[in-house]
Amino acid sequence: LRSQIYTYPPQPQRPVRRQDSVRVLIKFKIKYSKLVTILGIESSCDDTSAAVVRDGILLSNVIASQAVHEEYGGVVPELASRAHQQNIVPVVDAALRRAGIGKGDLSAIAFTRGPGLIGSLLVGTSFAKGMSLGLRIPIIDVNHLHGHVLAQFVRQNPDDRVPEFPYLCLLVSGGNSQIILVRSYNDMEILGRTIDDAAGEAFDKCAKVMGLPYPGGPHIDRLAAEGDATRFKFAKPHIPGYDYSFSGLKTSFLYTLRDGIKADPDFVEHNRADLAASLQRTIIDILTDKLAKAIDATGVRTVAIGGGVSANSGVRAAVADLCAKKGVEAFIPERKFTTDNAAMVAVAGYFKYLDKIFCPYDTAPYARVEI
Ligand code: KG4
């Protein structure tokens, strides 16, 4: 792949103009290609991922995670960017091979434009532009948050169930906690969002003070399975509407540890599972209280979850229970599609392709953006 891309670089004789390159080629592709085949590229944080979706069905999804950050207790942006540069060519190559297609079969390339780490996003964005120029196919920018919401539509078989519009999506990740009303693939409204920290941050930061490795969410999940969730009480916020807040919970957790350690220096060691279970229970209660209100107010018939925190066993079970109680249908994605992945980017790109929403070559990545 490397030699194919770099041996034949695009050499436009004059500046590339949107009408010259993108529009004409888009018309050509849409008119003459029968199958819509989208390559998705995700590089917003510390996972380099590429996926291929053909006519809405996932053909491949390759993810290279970056172990380099573990010793720092969090993602180091510069290291993430460098690792993306090393990973992107082999990852895209593997995604095409696993999908059993060649570059020439692609209809368009979708890439995560943001939000995320700007140095990481630049790698995926630049790669997508370069490859699309070489192949003379359009590019599609994807909002990472749209991708998480549309992860529900990653179908591995034509008869896989997908949600019906409108539906509510609880989007919970390391950077976001939102309740989103999804009216269609490209029409979404945020009903509530966190006013400070995200649920994933609460998991990770509380795990850190317990001495657990980064990211702490999965460790809390594992420990919570053996703990007593009623053992410790932590503060819950009183915020109007559908907004969330997790900073008070973090402080309350910290004070519990501080007071506990005064009485018993090995407090954390002695109460690991109960602390994790009580913390997880509190986060789940905060998330589901607002979700329940939003279900009642909107009258939707379907609820979905997305984002890294939706991999949490407790969150998955609690949302399924809540939906059963409310008589609405629950969509809980497979765990591999909850954390960052290119399958969701390719699917979001596929729906934009069908609506003919492409982007010009001067599209720049953005670190922050709303849905
Ligand atoms: O969506 P994501 O992969 O990255 C972005 O933030 O975009 O989410 C990462 C977050 C981290 O905070 C991580 O601790 C959390 O998802 N997470 C979990 C679990 N798996 C991942 N939190 C709780 N339980 C889990 N099983």
Image (tube, rainbow, N blue to C red):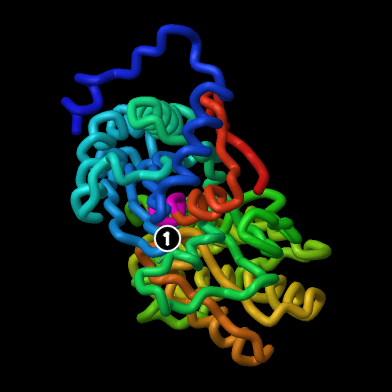
Residue 19: horizontal and vertical position, in percent?
58, 24
Magenta stretch containing residue 343, yes or no? yes
Locate the N terminus and report the quarter of the image it occupies. Answer: top left
Left or right for 187, reference 68: right
Residue most extreme to the front: 32
Q: Quadrant of ligand 1?
A: bottom left
Say what secondary structure mark 1 lies in.
loop
Magenta stretch containing residue 183, yes or no? no
Q: Crowdedness of circle 1 by 10 Å Cα count: few (<14), some, many (20+)?
A: some
Q: Which residues are magenta?
A: 341-346
Left or right for 292, reference 106: right
The structure residue drawn at horizontal position 38% and vertical position 56%, both measured from the top left corner, is 53
The structure residue drawn at horizontal position 44% and vertical position 31%, both measured from the top left corner, is 125
Looking at the image, residue 86 lies above or below residue 344: above
Residue to which mark 1 is pinned: 55
Does any portion of residue 267 appear in the rendered image?
A: no
Residue 295: horizontal and vertical position, in percent?
73, 77
Q: Which residue is more in the foreground, 36 or 368?
A: 36
Residue 352: horizontal and vertical position, in percent?
56, 49
Q: Which residue is more in the foreground, 264 or 186?
A: 186
Left or right for 108, reference 351: left
Residue most extreme to the top: 13
The structure residue drawn at horizontal position 36% and vertical position 73%, both measured from the top left corner, is 157
The chief SS type of the magenta part is helix
Looking at the image, residue 42 lies above or below residue 233: above
Looking at the image, residue 307 lies above or below residue 368: below
* Kind of residue indicated by mark 1: Asp
Quadrant of the image occupied by residue 2: top left
